[in-house]
Image (spheres, grey):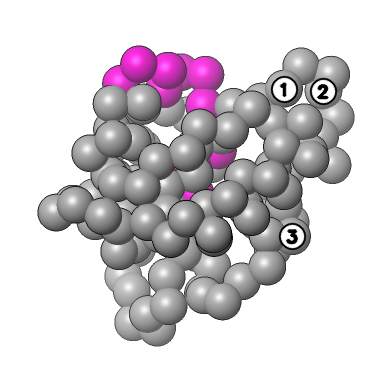
Amino acid sequence: MTNSAVPSLALVVEDDQLQRKILSDTLKDENMDVIQCESAEAAELVIARVGAELRLLVTDVKLAGPASGIALAEFAQQNFPGLIVVVSGEDELVLPLQFRFLKKPYRPSDVLRLVAF
């Protein structure tokens, strides 16, 4: 799916280790470099450091730590130009229009369909 020989950088923020690994492995298979975090606080540090290089952020709404994935997505929107995908098992989420949403359970291939490389 990736058209470029140069890997793109993705940030996967998910407190469930297995879900984080599965999605990260799928993105790596698409020639992406992946940084993984389990909390919004850790992800904000990554965004502050490499935000301009990020092509994709995938975050769950409920994360380890006090901050939510929605707050993280809003922070990220101000700090990098890439695609933001918010995932959740909740049905009644109000998200800004520029965020993409996937309802859990989702397949990693669903994320790939949202990303236009």
Mark 3 residue type: Ser
Q: Residue 15 carries which label?
A: none
First to last magenta residue range = 48-58
Q: Do the residues labelled 1 and 2 touch (CB within 8 Å)?
A: yes
Tell me the quarter of the picture where residue 72 sits: top left
Q: Where is residue 38 in the image (x, y as percent from the top left)?
A: 36, 47
Mark 2 residue type: Ser
- Quadrant containing the C terminus is top right
Q: In this view, does 11 lie to the left or right of 93?
A: right
Which residue is disc 3 drawn over?
109
Q: Which mark is residue 4?
A: 2
Residue projecting furthest to the bottom: 91
Which residue is disc 1 drawn over?
7
Q: How far apart are marks 2 and 3 (CA)?
A: 19 Å
Q: Which of marks 1 and 2 is in front?
A: 1
Residue visible at 51% across and 74% down in the picture: 103
Residue visible at 42% across and 70% down in the picture: 88
Residue visible at 52% across and 19% down in the picture: 53
Q: Position of residue 60 (x, y in %)?
A: 40, 59
Residue visible at 36% across and 27% down in the picture: 47
Q: How far apart are marks 1 and 2 (CA)?
A: 7 Å
Mark 1 residue type: Pro
Q: Is mark 2 on a helix, strand or loop?
A: loop
Residue projecting furthest to the left: 66
